[in-house]
Image (spheres, rainbow, N blue to C red):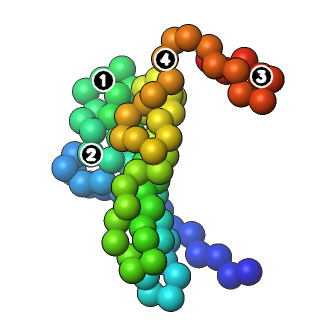
């Protein structure tokens, strides 16, 4: 398997730093730190993974990780986990 790696640096707050994964010259996934403002207390630059359909058209966010809280959202652009614990496969998740 051939792999490529890169360091991507957004040089202004209005830029997102991201990596596009393509197959046969068509976008499949976008992994990026978004443009949520970094206002202190570890806020901003949240991580998102967006998916693309067979034609390379964006379908939306598949996974969202909030940097400040490390909370996760699945199929949304914000964290969906609340303070109440969840049970997943017999394990209590907070």
Residue holding disc 4: 82
Tell me if residue 63 comes above or below residue 28 in the rendering: above
Structural crowding at the residue carrying mark 3, measured as other residues with C-alpha within 10 Å and reported as few (<14), some (14–19) or many (≥20): few
Residue 27 seen in the current view: no
N-terminal-most mark, 4 or 1: 1
Mark 1 vs mark 2: in front: 2
Structural crowding at the residue carrying mark 4, measured as other residues with C-alpha within 10 Å and reported as few (<14), some (14–19) or many (≥20): few
Secondary structure state at the residue bearing disc 4: loop
Q: Could you tell me residue 13's position as x and y percent?
A: 22, 46
Q: Could you tell me residue 45's position as x and y percent?
A: 35, 41
Cα gap from disc 2 to disc 3, whole angstroms: 34 Å
Q: Residue furthest right?
A: 90
Secondary structure state at the residue bearing disc 3: strand
Cα gap from disc 3 to disc 1, whole angstroms: 33 Å
Cα gap from disc 4 to disc 2, whole angstroms: 23 Å
Secondary structure state at the residue bearing disc 2: loop
Cα gap from disc 1 to disc 2, whole angstroms: 14 Å
N-terminal-most mark, 3 or 1: 1
Residue 60 seen in the current view: yes
N-terminal-most mark, 2 or 3: 2
Could you tell me which residue is drawn at 28 percent across and 33 percent down? 38
In front: 21, or 9? 21
N-terminal-most mark, 1 or 2: 2
Residue holding disc 2: 35
Mark 2 vs mark 3: in front: 3
Q: Is residue 91 left or right of residue 19?
A: right
Residue holding disc 3: 91
N-terminal-most mark, 3 or 4: 4
| Residue 40 tag number | 1
């Amino acid at each position: 398997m051939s792999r490529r790696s890169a360091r991507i640096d957004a040089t202004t707050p209005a830029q997102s730093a991201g990596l596009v994964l393509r197959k046969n010259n068509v976008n499949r996934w976008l992994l990026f730190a978004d443009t949520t403002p970094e206002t202190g207390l570890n806020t901003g630059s949240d991580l998102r993974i967006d998916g693309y359909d067979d034609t390379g058209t964006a379908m939306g966010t598949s996974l969202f990780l909030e940097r400040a809280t490390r909370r996760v959202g699945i199929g949304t652009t914000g964290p969906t986990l609340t303070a109440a614990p969840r049970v997943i496969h017999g394990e209590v998740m907070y």
